[in-house]
Amino acid sequence: MLLAIDTSAGTSVAVVDRDRGIIAERASADTRGHAEIIGTYIDECLRESGVAIAALSGVVAGMGPGPFTGLRVGIAAARAFALGAGKPVVRVVSHDAIAFAEYGSVQRPASSTEPLLVVTDARRREVYWSAYEGTDAAGLPQRVGPAGLCVPADLERAVPDYSRYRRLDASTVSAGAMGMLAEALFVAGEPFADAQPLYLRSPDVTVSAGPKRVS
């Protein structure tokens, strides 16, 4: 069983099991209130599921793409919870979870070859995008290269062979789908996401290179 956390879009928390599926899930589309509600969502999901912390196998962290301020809240929460519980953290690309849920709503585990373009709001009048060539025999989404970032007007030029894809604009990421994807990756022996979050651009605030000069 896994506790899954994602704040790449809104805030989503879930407890999942490989056999039982999504046991409990909480989600909010608010892109600014991550820190205020994430602790409550974790507590509610654990209570509703009836799963003891000791029974969890690990904690899943959504790694984006997502804006720096929001995305780091979920990653920090996943790391802190895992550290306190003595559980490992596994990482999943948030767009992969969207594609996994979308493909799975039609066909799983048999492979699908429908090209899919996942698009999410990056704020600052930009969008994140990831292209998929369908799924493999295990139902895992097959991403074409890394995620991208562009202004909406440039999306058709940024995505090679844009017209091939069915576009899916997603406003939320299901932590339940993300947890189930982590389970599927483990069963298939496939690697999890890298440790580096997919911010795709620099944060608004940076550390000064030296002390501020006082005149």
Image (spheres, rainbow, N blue to C red):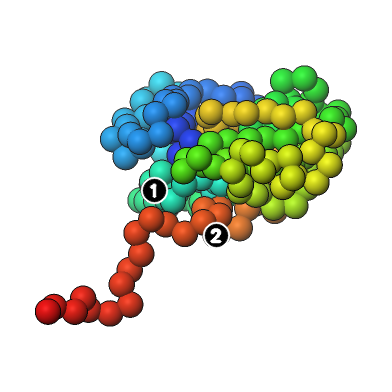
Q: Position of residue 121 (x, y in %)?
A: 53, 36
Assess whether mark 2 and mark 1 are in contact (beta carbons under 8 angstroms).
Answer: no
**Quarter location, residue 168:** top right
Left or right position of 74 against 109: left
**Quarter location, residue 114:** top right
In the image, what residue occupies the spot 55% across and 55% down?
200
In the image, what residue occupies the spot 42% across and 26% down?
28
Residue located beneath label 1 in the image: 69
Q: Secondary structure at mark 1?
A: helix
**Mark 2: amino acid:** Gln
| Disc 1 residue crowd, few under 14, some 14–19, many 20+, Cα 10 Å | some
Q: Position of residue 157 (x, y in %)?
A: 74, 45
Marks 1 and 2, Cα distance to the nearest angstrom?
15 Å
**Quarter location, residue 163:** top right
Numbered mark located on residue 163 in the image: none
Q: Secondary structure at mark 2?
A: loop
Residue 209 appears in view = yes
Q: Position of residue 52 (x, y in %)?
A: 41, 33
**Mark 1: amino acid:** Thr
Of marks 1 and 2, which one's residue comes earlier in the chain? Answer: 1
Residue located beneath label 2 in the image: 196
